[in-house]
Amino acid sequence: MSEEPLDWVTLPLDLQHRFFEFAEQEANITTKAIQELSSKLNELKKLVMPYIRKFETSSKVRTVAAVDGSRSPRLSERLGVRYGVFATGVVYLEGVKKKDEKFEAGTFKRKQALSQDKSKYFFDLLSTYVERKLALEALEKCDLLILDGSFYSFLYPVLRMKKVGLYGAQEEKLMRETFEITEKIRKSGKAIGIIKRSHTRAIGGYISLKDRENPLVTIIDKLTLSILMPEQTIFNYEDLIGEIPVQVYTQLAQFALTKNWPKEDPLKEAERKVFAPFEALKLQKDGIKEMRRLQVKAYNNLPPCEVEYPSSVGTKKVHDWLGQKDFFNESTNLPMALDLVDSLVEIPSKFIDEFVSEVEGRVLDTILLQKEDYEVARMFFTLLNPQKPM
């Protein structure tokens, strides 16, 4: 069987050559960045290595619950309204043994006359609300609850909604309910968040206070710690930056990266940015101020896993949780329970089209039994769908 030709060779020769030139330029830039990082590693070792510690494994087996959700990556507009679908699940494990599971599905629908941005923001907030609600139910049945993501990250898109005038009574109600549930989860003393797609640059932010031009300022912590951390080790951010939230130091790195360094008291200005959603939405800041983070590396040749937890829990208890036998998946270095529920609830990218096609099919089946409405239905679908989706 012959192989499909590369898309590259289907382009005109002039375009092929131009893109080869671009690829060469990008390769040179990336090579230089890697060489620069390598030359700075000794500096980073002196700063970070004293705080990287071995963590002890624990023989105690606990019931671990992980909650995750998935939503259609885009909204379908084929039926004259915007449709989205989402799925949420919780899986309970004792070691590697599955004890229980629960799944919920939902749909999102908005009129096309409403802003696309408003629809997307609300859809994201709604799916977070359903996840947190399921997580709250799971608390009673587990010793440790794992959330997907940071406890309070959902508030930053809400702040953007408010700034661009897309925030109304419906959004306010849903935001407050989600916040209240999150507070109950935090205060339970048995929940952590896993930051899978981490952009944390707290180490870079720490360095920026002394040297804003240092190339390490721009590197995400996950990359540098992947190189420096041996397996079975933990890096507690609190050992380096104290009780200030990690997000504040990441904001310092952002100031340095964008050449927007505050003229006075950069740390205070970074705090103002991080706490902005709580100020604008009139929410208590106790929770965000209490949150701490660490990076844990259970297996070699994999990036560390970033963990968020309330300081009231204490690092000893968190280390004990993370040290459980078979807690981490050796293929991903993420908690086994979280990987499992993530794989079960993932919605394929084209599922929303199949869902809307199912709705269309059921409408047509019903209309065919009522012949007087058939012509109206035919024109309805023709006008809405002048061409087949790609």
Image (cartoon, rainbow, N blue to C red):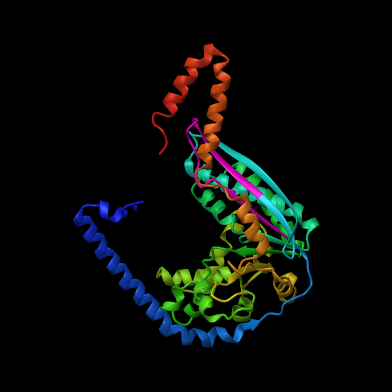
Q: Position of residue 144 (x, y in %)?
A: 75, 63
Decide whether the magenta segment is chiefly helix, strand or loop: strand
From which residue to which does the magenta span run?
64-88
Q: Position of residue 182 (x, y in %)?
A: 69, 56
Residue 261 in view (yes/no): no
Q: Nearer the viewer, residue 161 or 303?
A: 303
The residue positioned farthest toward the top in the image shown: 372
The residue positioned farthest toward the front in the image shown: 1
Q: Report which quarter residue 248 is drawn in.
A: bottom right
Query: Total number of numbered labels?
Result: 0
Confirm whether the magenta stretch covers residue 372: no
Q: Position of residue 24 (x, y in %)?
A: 28, 68
> Which residue is at 52% across, 43% downward?
118
Q: Position of residue 274 (x, y in %)?
A: 56, 64
> Which residue is at 61% across, 60% downward?
149
Query: Measured along the vertical axis of the image, is residue 315 above or below residue 120?
Result: below
Q: Report which quarter residue 320 is drawn in.
A: bottom right
Residue 251 in view (yes/no): yes
Confirm whether the magenta stretch covers residue 82: yes
Query: Measured along the vertical axis of the image, is residue 154 above or below residue 312?
Result: above
Q: Is residue 354 left or right of residue 5?
A: right
Q: Is residue 230 left or right of residue 180?
A: left
Q: Quadrant of the C terminus?
A: top left
> Which residue is at 62% across, 64% downward?
194
